[in-house]
C-alpha cells in the first residue's frame, strides 16, 4: 500500500488515503504514525484487504523491478520528518 493523500495530521499521528499498488483499491488509514519505521516497514507490509497483496509481496514477485539503492528511501514522502 502507498499513501496517496494525507487527510489530517496531529503531531506524528495521521490519517490518510492509501492505495494498493496491485489492484488500485483505496482505503482510509486511521492509525498512521509519521516516522521512518512506519513509512519504510509498516506501510510496505500492509496487506490489501481486496487482493491480499502488500508492497513487500509484490516486490518478491518482481512487480517492482527497480531495486531501491541503499541509503535512500524514496517511499518516504517529502513531508515526512524523520
Ligand atoms: Zn489490492
Image (cartoon, rainbow, N blue to C red):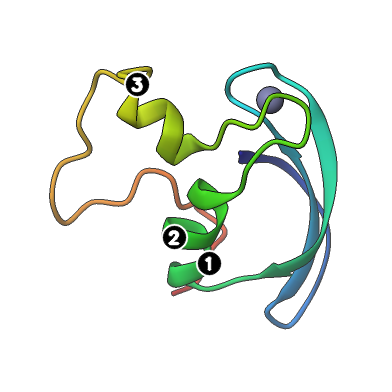
**Furthest residue to the front?**
52
Element under label 1? helix
Total number of numbered discs in the rendering: 3
What residue is shown at x 46% (from left), y 52% (from top)? 76
Closer to the N terminus: mark 3 or mark 1?
1
Q: Which residue is mark 1?
A: 38
Q: Quadrant of ligand 1?
A: top right
Circles 2 and 1: CB distance less than 8 Å?
yes
Q: Which residue is mark 3?
A: 61
Closer to the N terminus: mark 2 or mark 3?
2
Residue 43: x, y in percent? 56, 53
The image quadrant that residue 32 belongs to is bottom right
Element under label 3? loop
Quadrant of the snapshot with the N terminus: top right
- Is residue 59 positioned above or below 35 on the image? above
In the image, taking residue 24 as reference, residue 69 lies left or right, namely: left
- 10 Å neighbourhood of mark 1: few (<14), some, or many (≥20)? some
**Furthest residue to the left?**
70
Q: Could you say which is closer to the camera, residue 47 or residue 9?
A: 47
What residue is shown at x 50% (from left), y 71% (from top)? 81
Q: Could you say which is closer to the camera, residue 16 or residue 64?
A: 64
Amino acid at each position: 500500500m502507498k499513501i496517496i493523500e494525507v487527510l489530517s495530521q496531529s503531531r506524528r499521528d495521521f490519517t490518510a488515503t492509501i492505495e494498493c499498488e496491485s489492484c488500485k483499491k483505496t482505503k482510509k488509514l486511521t492509525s498512521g504514525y509519521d516516522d521512518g519505521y512506519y513509512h519504510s516497514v509498516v506501510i510496505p507490509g500492509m496487506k490489501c484487504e481486496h487482493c491480499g497483496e502488500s508492497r513487500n509481496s509484490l516486490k518478491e514477485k518482481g512487480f517492482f523491478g527497480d531495486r531501491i539503492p541503499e541509503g535512500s528511501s524514496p517511499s518516504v514522502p517529502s513531508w515526512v520528518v524523520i
